[in-house]
Amino acid sequence: MNLMRSYVGKRLLQLVFVLFGVTFLTYIVTAAAPSDGAEMYYLSRGFTPSQELLKQTREDMGLHDPLLIRYGRWLKNALKGELGVSYSSGEHVLTQLGRRLPGTLRLAGTAFVLMVFLAFPLGILTAVYKNSSMDYVVRFVTFFGNAMPDFWVALILMFILAVKLKWFRVMGTNDLKSMVMPVLTLALPLACSYIRQIRAAVLEEKNREYVIGARARGVSEKRIMICHVLPNALIPIITLMGLSMGHLLGGAAIIETIFSWQGIGSMAVEAIRNRDYPVIQGYVIWMAVIYVFVNLAADVFCYLLDPVKRRGR
Amino acid sequence: MRDKKREARFRLCLALAAAVFLVLLAAFGRWLAPYDPLEVDYGAVMAPPGREHLCGTDRLGRDIFSRILWGAGSSFFLTFVMVAVTSLTGVAVGLTAGLLGGGTDTVLMRLIDVLLAFPGSVFAIAVAGIMGAGIFHTVLALALVWWTKYARLTRNMASEIRNKDYIIQARFGGAGDMGILWRYILPNILPQAVIMASLDVGGMMMSLAGLSFLGLASQPPAPEWGYMLFESRQYMQTAPWMMIAPGAAILITVIVFNLLGDAVRDVLDPKE
């Protein structure tokens, strides 16, 4: 357990480092941008400022200071929990994040659950009944699913479910019914990829020598599968799924935009289109926090499941 | 075991033939195209697929089949350049980190951690959005993220191999650093990097299409598969063929290159 604690501590230290890195990186990128905050501030309000006004605003916003000083100032405010105000809406960045986050959380959570319920049974069954007709059908479908760009999947779902069958409206309003299409778009390609990975992992584990040994000792096939093969094969998969969850939580920018879903991914795309730097910076922080915590959670989970690691080697 | 290898080689030949065919089509497609991809024809706006127009026409009466053939060139070229540049950079950085170790290694690996904290496409959207849309910025942004996984793979393999007994033996035998690198380390790493690169082609093509779908990587009216799909969205009700052909073009290309990647892996992977 001590080992565990120092490990978690190390990871949290890493979080600090990653946060510094990503925020600084976005700062450099925004500094290299052709238009600055002062200009965007007026343009997003719909008028073109005069040169004097621009100069004055730049002075007020402190844009004339060197990059490092500006970053330092932003950092000081950020540590106090003030991430600034959105250029285009005038709303606090944290408020905006809080408003958009639930949409993404609902989408990501539902898509993840659906993906798990598709991937585990199908992946395991296709491995157990290798070369059966079901195996061929699933492999065929997942192969295609893997090669389809997700935004095309979205368009096809829209065409079939909204235009032809008229079950849903094309534009979403963030209610339960309009969740169906984006959730399917997120879950299906992901499930396709995991079905293949789970199948491959289970098949590889089934060929290990200890399985032959267990069989020789007269252990039943069912028991071998459930007690030996599956736990060993699925641990790495669960780690990978953790990473996918991280990507889902980042908000699927393209999918949310296609379905006009009010989430954090579409927020990022809007902020980027409006060059709304404070919002972009807030989004970047959210991404970095997710990345580190998801990695941490996946590692801890593996540690708890894997007896070799638990004993501290 | 031998049969498996032979079967994999056979699959490799098939996939390679299909891939070469697609590449030739992309390179010379513009001369096969029946129409000018930019030619506006108001007499044939959103014409369904038929004799005149194989895949139909779009909202300006432009021939979709010709646009796809023309768009293939830039799609393929960009994809290959990107995969080549990112894999070479990644391997170079990974080797440096893995072989030098110490401080260099730590700094480079932390840098990669930072870059990995972004999902690739979001970072690309951010860079392209902030710097302004356009092929160059988008490509730069994608490249900034993609090289990291090659660097990680190479670095881990290099630092593992570095202390193997046979390397130490070679050093005793008087081999220099470069000699060891060329003779022992690269031959171990390259097959893995080639496998990764060939499996990456499809993913790279989809990422590029996704960015041009968002309007971040294309200069309309130039034909671009991703952007053609974006345009098709508004006309889904009246002209669904507008979204069929570009999507199918991406699908077919990605399938062929995924098959190629799988075959390359099965032939090269020493584990098999």
Image (cartoon, coloured by chain):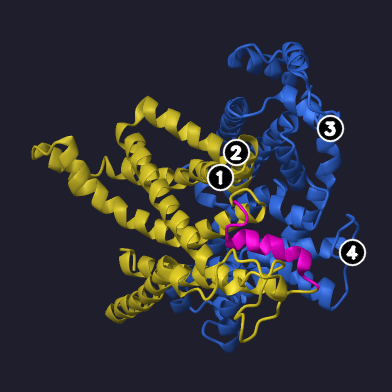
Q: Are marks 4 and 2 on the same chain?
A: no
Q: Which residue is mark 4?
A: A177
Q: Quadrant of residue B45?
A: bottom right
Three-letter amino acid code at the position of disc 2: Val
Tag of residue B138: 1
Name the residue: 72% across, 36% down.
A283
Which structural element holds mark 4? helix
Q: Residue at x 60, y 41 (%)?
A: B128
- Disc 3 residue type (three-letter): Gly
- Rendered colour, chain A: blue
Q: Which mark is residue A46?
A: 3
Q: Which residues are magenta?
A: B219-237
Badges 3 and 1, same chain: no
Residue at which label 2 appears: B127
> Is B203 a magenta residue?
no
Q: Amino acid at mark 1?
A: Thr
Residue B185 to residue A281: above or below: below
Is residue B222 shown in magenta? yes
Residue at mark 4 to residue at mark 3: CA–CA distance: 36 Å
Which type of secondary structure does the marked residue at label 2 adopt?
helix
Which mark is nearer the camera, 4 or 2?
A: 2
B161 to the left or right of A91: left
Q: Which mark is residue B154?
A: none
Cα separation, mark 4 vs mark 2, equals: 34 Å
Hey, what amino acid is under mark 4? Lys
